[in-house]
């Protein structure tokens, strides 16, 4: 596949530390739920 056709999803840019912390906690909780199954 040519490199100009590759598209990567970049991590979201957060406006505050609280927003970033909430996002990370939500992602961690989702990962733990999947791992727990």
Image (cartoon, rainbow, N blue to C red):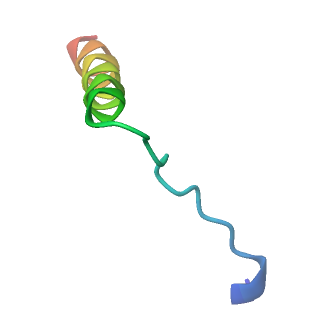
Return the x and y of residue 24 as percentages of the image width and height.
Answer: 29, 31
Q: Which residue is drawn at 32% across and 35% down?
A: 20
22 up-or-down from 24: above or below:
above
Point 33% across, 20% down: residue: 26
* Quadrant in the rendering for residue 30: top left
> How many numbered marks, from 0 up?
0
Q: Which residue is located at x 73 percent, y 83 percent?
A: 1
Residue toward you, 21 or 33: 21
Q: State the image quarter where residue 9 is shown.
A: bottom right
Q: With respect to residue 33, does 19 lie above or below?
A: below
Horizontal relation, residue 4 to residue 19: left or right: right
User: Considering the image in quadrants, where does the C terminus appear?
Assistant: top left
Q: Which of the two residues, 32 or 14, is positioned nearer the viewer here?
A: 14
Q: Which residue lies furthest to the front in this view?
A: 16
Q: Is residue 22 left or right of residue 5?
A: left
Camera-side residue: 7 or 33? Answer: 7
Q: Position of residue 13 (x, y in %)?
A: 47, 48
Q: Is residue 36 above or below residue 7?
A: above
The answer to whether residue 17 is above or below residue 35 is: below
**Whole-percent x, y for residue 6 in the image:** 69, 74
């Amino acid at each position: 596949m040519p490199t100009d056709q590759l598209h990567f999803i970049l991590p979201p840019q957060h406006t505050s530390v609280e927003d970033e912390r909430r996002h990370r906690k939500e992602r961690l909780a989702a990962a733990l739920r999947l791992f727990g199954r």
